[in-house]
Image (cartoon, rainbow, N blue to C red):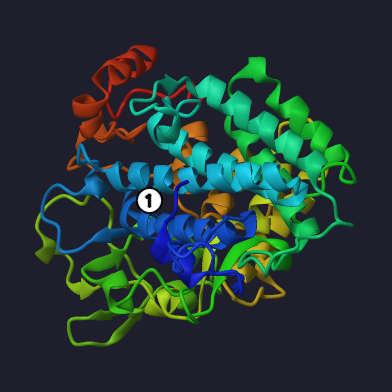
Amino acid sequence: MTYIAACLSLFMLNTACTGDFEEINEDPNRIAQISPGTLINPIIYGMASHNASRSASTNFDLMQVTLPFPSVSGGLHRYDVSPNIGNSSWNTSYKWLANIREMRMAAEASGDNNYLAAALTLNAWVYSNLTDQFGPVPMTEAVRAEDGILYPAYDSQELIYETILSDLETANQLYDTDMGMIYASDILFNNDVEKWKKFTNSLHMRLLLRISNRTETNAFQKLTTMINNPEEYPVFESNAESAILQVTGVGANVSPWGRPQDFRLNVKMASFFIDNLNDWNDPRRPLIATTGTDLDNNNIGYIGIPSGYDGPDSQFEYNASTLQILQVTNPMQIFILPYSEVEFIKAEVAQRGFTGDAEEHYNKGVKAAIEQVKATMPEDYFDNTAVQYDGTLEQIMLQKYYALYFVDYQQWFEFRRTGLPELPTTPAMLNNGIMPSRFPYPSDQQVYNLSNYQAAVQMIGEDDINTKVWWDN
């Protein structure tokens, strides 16, 4: 069995002792039998903490939240993409997918449907992020070394989505609130089966919307069915129910930033991100960003630097805003799937004419997005015409962009799906100023899994950052 000893020891849920010493060669430091409760917390923390760090280091630059400064040339904010940009996410995902597989098998062996449903949900969460970064990835043959499969074949993104969406449907039916979750509390929902079920269905909605450009999937029709049947498909209804990991700073549940000051080291806020918040007089500003100063150290308010700027750093005769390190200082939050995202999904489905109340869902999404970062929603916020609902998808997606702040790669995925919000470009941007559509496969795949790598490339046409994935059409 796959066993991440260091992590499991930190999240150990039960200890046991015995008076039977016949097995004198048994290692007392190893768990004799892994339970689904033993695995769930390391999986949640390990994957969520990695996603948070990659959101800041990668997604922020791609999506004009922040940029490195100084930065005379190159850099991800100019679409200068390293061939190994996705390596850590690939390796980390498969590390925890192996543990999710163990959790699923343990739940099946014990007949525990609530943990089985949770395992199916975690599996869908990790695989969806992984395939949306790269396109085809190994799934059906992945993490099966014990079966002798050392070089797994890649699966098409269509098959991956078909599988994980089916698994989420199954998970929704498996949950049993009367049975509960019998092991020590999980760090995400504190063993609340109803919240786990709402996470499953909220994730299901996210992934249906992701593939909605593929009309053959009937994704909008399925979303409509879910929205119109809340008793069968309950989803998040408040920030308190969100899939937001509360990092306590106690034990192993600590900030991924051992040195919070590194969060903003040589980092400035991007103009696009901060200018919109200024236009809205938005209460999130002091919680996300510092104020800038002029060269005499006078406060000049919230101010950014254009992503992909052309010319020397010296053109900016001010010290721009940077990130507030309190966001990554214990205790902190790691966003996995916030309630605000659910409301913006409902708003888009309504705006496209499949359901109703688009403005209501939009307003709820805006309010939830503000409050999820612990800001207070001003009573007159919607008096500003710049934030009043105008009936367009463009406005929904702009506000959703802020709701997805610090939610792994979701801003980037949604931009690729819709082309929104409209991000400014500059002559200094590489790749013809075109947003990358995927990450290249890790180079070691060409060394250790060459034939399967070549088959995967044939599925998509070219292992290139501009090759679109299956749903991105």
Front residue of 57/346: it is 57
Vertical side of 57 occupied by 229: above or below: above
Direction from residue 95 to residue 404 in the image, left or right: right
Figure quadrant of residue 463: top left
Front residue of 386/237: it is 237
Q: Position of residue 339 (x, y in %)?
A: 68, 57
Which residue lies under the disc numbered 1?
59
Is there any visible trace of residue 266 in the rendered image?
yes
Identified at 53% across, 57% down, the residue is 402
Direction from residue 225 to residue 141 in the image, left or right: left
Q: Position of residue 87 (x, y in %)?
A: 28, 43
Front residue of 182/313: it is 182
Q: Position of residue 273 (x, y in %)?
A: 41, 59
Front residue of 26/34: it is 26
Identified at 21% across, 33% down, the residue is 444
Q: Secondary structure at mark 1?
A: helix
Q: Callout 1 environment at 10 Å: few (<14), some (14 to 19), or many (20+)?
A: many
Vertical side of 29 occupied by 454: above or below: above
Is there any visible trace of residue 414 in the rendered image?
no
Count of numbered circles in the view: 1
Identified at 58% across, 24% down, the residue is 213
Q: Position of residue 20 (x, y in %)?
A: 60, 69
Identified at 67% across, 69% down, the residue is 185
Report the amino acid beneath label 1: Asn
Direction from residue 176 to residue 364 in the image, left or right: left
Figure quadrant of residue 116: top right
As drawn, the residue found furthest toward the front would be 22
